[in-house]
Image: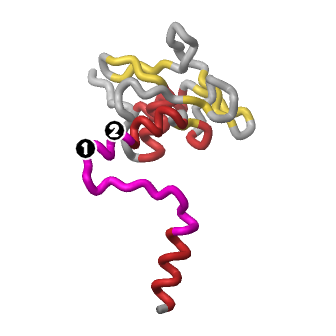
Amino acid sequence: MSRTAVHPYQRVIENSRREGERRVWEGARTATGAPRLRVGATDKDARRVVWEAHHNSTVAPGVAMVSTCGNDLCVAPGHVDIPYDEAEALIKHMSLYYADFQIVADLDCVLEATADEAVR
């Protein structure tokens, strides 16, 4: 009998419980206590699985993930992110490989400039 493959994000949901706005991991953990999920033959940080599913993107190997609410076991999509210093390193990496990669430092300035151009 063959098993139907379950998306890793669904397994995160199955291995966690709601606590208010948090979703607390109850599954396996790494040696450092981070939420751990087995995906194929690889162990992944469950927060990485959540971030990748939520953003429909991937995170470069070796980039650490954090729970922004202060609970290291939280895997709620709105509470999982890449630390600022890691994000800054990732931006530098992307700008080296993609000539047209740009960072918008202040979205309000961009929106105001766009609105001013539309009025002209």
Q: Residue at x 32, y 43 (%)?
A: 94
Residue 89: x %, y % from top left: 42, 35
Residue 96: x %, y % from top left: 28, 43
Q: What residue is pinned by disc 2? A: 93
Give whichever of 12, 80 is nearer the camera. 80
From mark 1 to mark 2, how far is it between C-alphas? 7 Å
Quarter of the image for residue 81 reads top right
Q: What residue is pinned by disc 1? A: 97
**Amino acid beneath label 2:** His
Q: Which residues are magenta?
A: 92-109
Q: Residue at x 55, y 68 (%)?
A: 109
Residue 9 appears in view = yes
Q: Residue at x 47, y 29 (%)?
A: 11
Residue 2: x %, y % from top left: 27, 24
**Furthest residue toward top:** 31
Residue 103: x %, y % from top left: 42, 54
Numbered badge on residue 13:
none
Q: Quadrant of the N terminus?
A: top left
Instruction: Tell me whether the residue at label 1 lies in contact with that at label 2, contact meaning CB atoms closer than 8 angstroms.
Output: yes
Against 85, residue 101 (above or below) is: below
Magenta segment includes 101: yes
Magenta segment includes 11: no
**Furthest residue toward bottom:** 120
Give whichever of 104, 47 is nearer the camera. 104
Crowd rating for badge 1 (residues with CA inside 10 Å; few <14, some 14–19, many 20+): few
**Amino acid beneath label 1:** Tyr
Question: Which element is circle 1 on?
Answer: helix
